[in-house]
Amino acid sequence: MTTDPREHTKQTLAQLGIKTPDAIAQEFAELRRQFDQENINFIDIGVSAHDQSAALRLYWLGRKAGILSQITNNWLKTAPPELKPAVGQELNKLKAHIELVLEESLNHFKEQVDLQLGVPEDLSLPGIERAFGTRHLIRQTFEELQRIFTAIGFSVVEGPEIETPYYNFEALNIPEHHPARDNMDTFYIEGARSSYLLRTHTSPMQIRTMEKEKPPVRIVVPGKVYRRDNPDATHGYMFHQIEGLAVDTDITFCDFKGAVEYFAREFLGPKTKTRLRPSYFPFTEPSAEVDATCHVCGGKGCRVCKFSGWIELFGAGMVNPAVYGFVKYDPERLSGFAFGMGVDRLAMMKYGVTEVPLLFQNDVRFLRQFP
Ligand code: DAH
């Protein structure tokens, strides 16, 4: 018997020719099979399952026109007294079955939607632990350098990476066509009105600071600088410097040397010794390269210091009086010292890093070595 349940249950049992409890049980078994079939048809078809489940419930359990109401009216109420208990029992069983199945499939449907849409977060669950990052080796080195200099009264200032030739060169006593511009291959920025460049060193901030502030001046300037170098193991087109400047009425070469020695001991250890080698920078006079005894061998000679016992730290010197002229400082009354350190170089030297690219490739296996 495969008939439309609605049409089928419009007739009474007598009209259907059903006369025994067995026949009744068979009728209900068939109805149950039909319900189950319809239920299976929608159970896995996604979001619209919700509507379909509601439609199925209405069709079978609806008060007015549901199949079960129809059975109550057409079968139960009209059944001869001896068949009523059988019809009643079967009807209750079918109803319980349909309710159970509809509820189950609704739950199943909810799970599916949860899966598709994402379950609301359970706030009682422990949080996801994320690994902490570490400060980059360059950042750590900057912080260490700043700590060393702020401890003796320097303050930290920063300046623009896009500069004018005036601040980057002229006011530092490097006129056009000066050979000192040659070894500072410069990135120029083409502009409509005036020319700009990427600063090749942090020294322009000496000028900017002295223009703005009256002496005494004691500053360090951390920052990025740019040069047109071809990248290799020891060069990039960008690197980091920290500039230093101290100007006052009574600063001598001894103060300069004392500051340099203090720095070397703080940065490389208390036994470190320093020496000054004559050098040349247009903005200092005299100029010096500061060397320190090798932090690896203590000055005996090893591969790190190329068996000389010394390593080159940075360039420095007494501020060239010519520079004061550009910032309207009185060269008769004032004196000072300046220095410029390559931060990447210092970090690599201290921590035994041999390749510049390692610093900027963001490989966590490298970065994690400096927690
Ligand atoms: N600006 C120089 C450079 O980048 C480094 C330098 C040397 C800075 C001596 C100074 C200094 O302030 O006194 O090569």
Image (spheres, grey):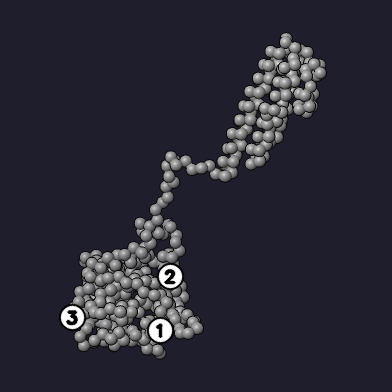
Q: Position of residue 164 (x, y in %)?
A: 41, 82
Closest to the observer, 154 or 88: 88
The quadrant in which the C terminus is found is bottom left
Q: Quadrant of residue 239?
A: bottom left
Name the residue type under label 2: Ala
Give SS at disc 2.
Answer: loop
The quadrant in which the N terminus is found is top right
Which of disc 3 and disc 2 is earlier in sequence?
2
Of the numbered discs in the image, which one, if any, rests on residue 233? Answer: 2
In the displayed image of the protein, which residue is found farthest to the top?
82
Name the residue type under label 1: Pro
Which of disc 1 and disc 3 is earlier in sequence?
1
Of the numbered discs in the image, which one, if any, rests on residue 165? Answer: 1
For image coordinates 28% across by 78% down, the residue present is 213
Closest to the observer, 167 or 71: 71
Q: Position of residue 282 (x, y in %)?
A: 32, 85
Of the numbered discs in the image, which one, if any, rests on residue 250? Answer: 3
Q: Quadrant of residue 335?
A: bottom left
Q: Quadrant of residue 75?
A: top right
For image coordinates 33% across by 86% down, the residue present is 173
Horizontally, residue 266 falls left or right of residue 363, namely left
Name the residue type under label 3: Asp
For image coordinates 40% across by 84% down, the residue present is 165
Task: Using the rendered image of the protein, determine whether residue 24 is visible from the camera's viewpoint.
Answer: no
Cα–Cα gap, marks 2 and 1:
29 Å
Give SS at disc 1.
Answer: helix
For image coordinates 42% across by 57% down, the residue present is 365
Give SS at disc 3.
Answer: loop
Eyeballing the image, is 332 above or below 342? below
In the displayed image of the protein, which residue is found farthest to the front?
64
